[in-house]
């Protein structure tokens, strides 16, 4: 699949999610068989954080909680790659305080529209949302102290460029903390070649070591997996999203995805840009 084809499919799938018309797998059913809050609790969000964000910010699309491990400090500037409806942006905004700033970037206009409504509803004056692709970030060199991302980089057809852009956006000494899907063994060919499985955060996932290597090649140091967990089959249903087994795309047997699940991991990865 070509890069533009992948981006178009991903953009369309998540536009439907933003409009409330389906899951990230393109299904017309609710994501993952549970409420967004239930899904978010499974992948690591606490009750206090979920209660403090606008009601429309949590779509249950994450595969971890990058803010929890980012060590954010008051006054810092945080950049969220693929911010969606703004869940991690709003949690980060509370951590950095009124003197800090959070910038969310997303390529889906419908998601940004929803995120901006959420910011207005919640009175988040220190959060802004920008339209753009994570391979071509609409930010200045060294604008951020911390870059975060949640189950989005695996959707990019050019992950190495994403990490180079993250490195550019960070000031010297800045920190990267991402939650993402990665592999411990190759996927079955019918899963790896599926556009729908790509949108569901599966087919685009890299091997864990390749993922870490891409971050190192961008110039980062102290690259490490801070946490790793299994694919949460227990919270999945026939319709799913990032972090759970997705619905079997047309022409693909559901057992193919379930057989692949043991090699798919949710990882929290941290790194530092040299000072």
Image (cartoon, rainbow, N blue to C red):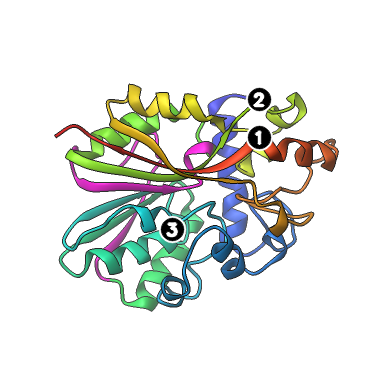
Q: Which mark is residue 215?
A: none
Nearer the observer, 41 or 34: 41
Mark 2: give few (<14), some (14-19) or many (20+) Cα within 10 Å: some
Circle 3 sits on which residue?
Answer: 112
Residue 76 x/y as whole percent: 19, 56
Please tell me which residue is depicted at 41% across the width and 24% down the height of the picture: 213
Nearer the observer, 37 or 109: 37
Mark 3, mark 2: which one is toward the viewer? 2
- Whether residue 86 is visible to the viewer of this picture, yes or no, is no
Residue 170's place in the image compared with 130, above or below, is above
Residue 204 x/y as whole percent: 58, 33
Label 2 vs 1, first from the N-terminus: 2
Mark 2 and mark 1 in contact? Answer it, CB < 8 Å: yes
Left or right, 233 with reference to 47: right
Q: Which mark is residue 263?
A: 1
Circle 2 sits on which residue?
Answer: 186
Q: CA distance from mark 2 to mark 1?
A: 8 Å
Label 3 vs 2, first from the N-terminus: 3
Q: Secondary structure at mark 2?
A: loop
Left or right, 69 with reference to 111: left
Q: CA distance from mark 1 to mark 3?
A: 33 Å
Mark 1: give few (<14), some (14-19) or many (20+) Cα within 10 Å: some
Left or right, 22 with reference to 204: right
Q: Secondary structure at mark 1?
A: helix
180 part of magenta stretch: no
Quadrant location, the C terminus: top left
Residue 247's place in the image compared with 198, above or below, is below
Q: Which residues are magenta?
A: 125-154
């Amino acid at each position: 699949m070509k890069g533009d084809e992948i981006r178009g499919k991903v953009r369309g799938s998540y536009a439907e999610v933003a409009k409330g018309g389906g899951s990230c797998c393109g299904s017309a059913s609710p994501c993952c068989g549970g409420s967004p809050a239930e899904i978010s609790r499974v992948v690591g969000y606490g009750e206090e954080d979920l209660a403090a964000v606008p009601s429309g910010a949590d779509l249950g699309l994450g595969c971890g909680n990058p803010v929890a491990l980012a060590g954010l400090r008051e006054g810092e500037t945080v950049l969220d790659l693929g911010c969606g409806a703004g869940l991690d942006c709003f949690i980060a905004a509370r951590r950095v305080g009124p003197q800090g700033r959070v910038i969310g970037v997303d390529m889906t206009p419908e998601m940004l529209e929803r995120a901006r409504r959420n910011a207005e509803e919640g009175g988040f004056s220190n959060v802004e949302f920008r339209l753009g692709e994570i391979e071509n970030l609409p930010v200045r060199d060294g604008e951020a102290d911390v870059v975060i991302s949640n189950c989005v980089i695996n959707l990019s057809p050019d992950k190495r460029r994403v990490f180079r852009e993250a490195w550019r956006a960070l000031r010297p000494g800045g920190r990267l903390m991402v939650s993402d899907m990665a592999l411990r063994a190759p996927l079955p060919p019918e899963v790896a070649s599926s556009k729908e499985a790509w949108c569901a955060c599966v087919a685009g996932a890299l091997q864990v070591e390749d993922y870490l290597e891409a971050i190192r090649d961008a110039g980062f140091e102290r690259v490490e997996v801070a946490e790793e967990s299994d694919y949460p089959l227990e919270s999945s249903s026939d319709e799913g999203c990032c972090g759970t087994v997705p619905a079997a795309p047309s022409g693909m047997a559901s057992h193919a995805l379930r057989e692949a699940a043991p090699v798919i991991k949710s990882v929290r990865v941290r790194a530092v840009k040299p000072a």
